[in-house]
């Protein structure tokens, strides 16, 4: 196992949790008493992290929310804060990068050397050579988009292609290729949305115990019971179930961190109700 997969497995066990908190700091929704701008983003996210770290298996900052507000320094500081204060909780940088050659190498450096993320999300569209710069960091995780939670994902992911097992859908082909061909360093995972539990079950059957990052519960309306029953691995783990807005913005007042903790605990406990 890689450092990332070891961190993840230890976190599943230690915190008895498959919950990942998505850190998507929308400046328009940050409590007013924190102010505005990059400093407010940093303070808000650190408070959420400190309030929920013992309830989660991972944190997932979404890079666009930081870049759009010129808060790259705050993102670096946030990830350093998680590593220092909550060592053992992996950080997934949600960047969905997809490029080739030397450009992919720079994106990999950004994720793993500048930000010190434990894992990063990437697009498979440009093929294996676009993924190698990430998987070459053997101790870090590479989480490949497969069946995304948005409705428009079906526009491409449900197209049929020829595969070694005959005709299959593109998302099935991605799952098979990642699990069987691209995971030679044992550090790959897949993104499969909670909004499509039937496809989640399908992917689990294809990839065995490969970790699955599952967005789409909470504000996006994915069903927790259906998600867990469809996607958990044989030992009742295997899932990184992300919830962002429903936890981050459980309160807009000075009690926002306590409200986020209560929402995270309720979500973790609901997930655990359906684990085997």
Image (tube, grey):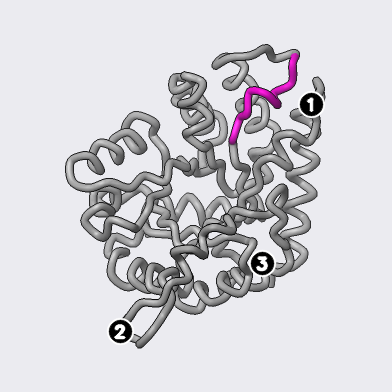
Q: Is residue 115 left or right of residue 265?
A: left
Does the CB distance between marks 1 and 2 fall below 8 Å?
no
- Residue 240: image quadrant is bottom right
Q: Residue tagged by mark 1?
A: 252
Between marks 3 and 1 in the image, the one whose residue lies nearer the viewer: 1
Answer few, some or many: residues within 10 Å of disc 1's Cα (few below 14, many 20 plus, some between 14 and 19). some
Q: Which residues are magenta?
A: 24-32
Q: Residue tagged by mark 3?
A: 228
In space, the residues marked 3 and 1 are separated at their CA atoms by 30 Å
Q: Residue at x 35, y 86 (%)?
A: 165
Near-viewer residue (47 or 151): 151
Q: Main secondary structure of the magenta part?
A: loop
Percent position of residue 32, x then y? 74, 16
* Mark closer to the chain start, 1 or 2: 2
Q: Residue at x 43, y 59 (%)?
A: 189
| Rendered position, 48 above or below 204 | above
- The residue sitting at the left extreme is 102
Q: Residue tagged by mark 2?
A: 164
* Mark closer to the chain start, 3 or 1: 3
Percent position of residue 127, x then y? 27, 59
Percent position of residue 229, x then y? 67, 72
Q: Residue at x 53, y 37 (%)?
A: 61
Q: Is residue 39 left or right of residue 7?
A: right
Q: Residue at x 57, y 55 (%)?
A: 150
Q: Is residue 35 left or right of residue 189?
A: right
- Residue 176: image quadrant is bottom left
Answer few, some or many: residues within 10 Å of disc 3's Cα (few below 14, many 20 plus, some between 14 and 19). many
Secondary structure of residue under mark 1: loop
* Mark closer to the chain start, 2 or 3: 2
């Amino acid at each position: 196992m890689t450092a990332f997969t070891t961190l993840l497995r230890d976190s599943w066990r230690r915190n008895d949790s498959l919950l990942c908190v998505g850190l998507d700091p929308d400046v328009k929704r940050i409590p007013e008493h924190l102010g505005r701008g990059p400093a407010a983003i940093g303070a808000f996210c650190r408070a959420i992290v400190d309030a929920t770290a013992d309830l989660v298996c991972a944190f997932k900052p979404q890079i666009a929310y930081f870049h759009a507000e010129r808060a790259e320094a705050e993102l670096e500081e946030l990830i350093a804060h998680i590593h220092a204060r909550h060592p053992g909780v992996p950080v997934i940088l949600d960047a969905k990068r997809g490029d080739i050659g030397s450009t992919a190498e720079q994106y990999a450096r950004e994720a793993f050397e500048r930000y010190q993320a434990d894992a990063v999300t990437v697009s498979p569209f440009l093929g294996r050579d676009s993924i190698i710069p990430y998987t070459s960091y053997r101790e870090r995780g590479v989480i490949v988009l497969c069946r995304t939670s948005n409705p428009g994902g079906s526009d491409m992911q449900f197209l049929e292609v020829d595969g070694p097992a005959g005709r299959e859908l593109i998302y099935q082909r991605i799952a098979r290729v990642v699990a069987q061909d691209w995971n030679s360093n044992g550090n790959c995972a897949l993104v499969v949305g909670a909004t499509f539990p039937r496809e989640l079950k399908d992917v689990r059957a294809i990839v065995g115990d490969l970790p699955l990052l599952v967005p789409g519960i909470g504000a996006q309306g994915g069903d927790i019971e259906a998600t867990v029953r469809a996607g958990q691995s044989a030992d009742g783990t295997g899932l990184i179930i992300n919830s962002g807005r429903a936890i981050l913005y459980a309160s807009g007042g000075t009690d926002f961190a306590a409200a986020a903790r209560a929402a995270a605990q309720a979500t973790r406990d609901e997930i655990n109700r359906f684990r085997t």
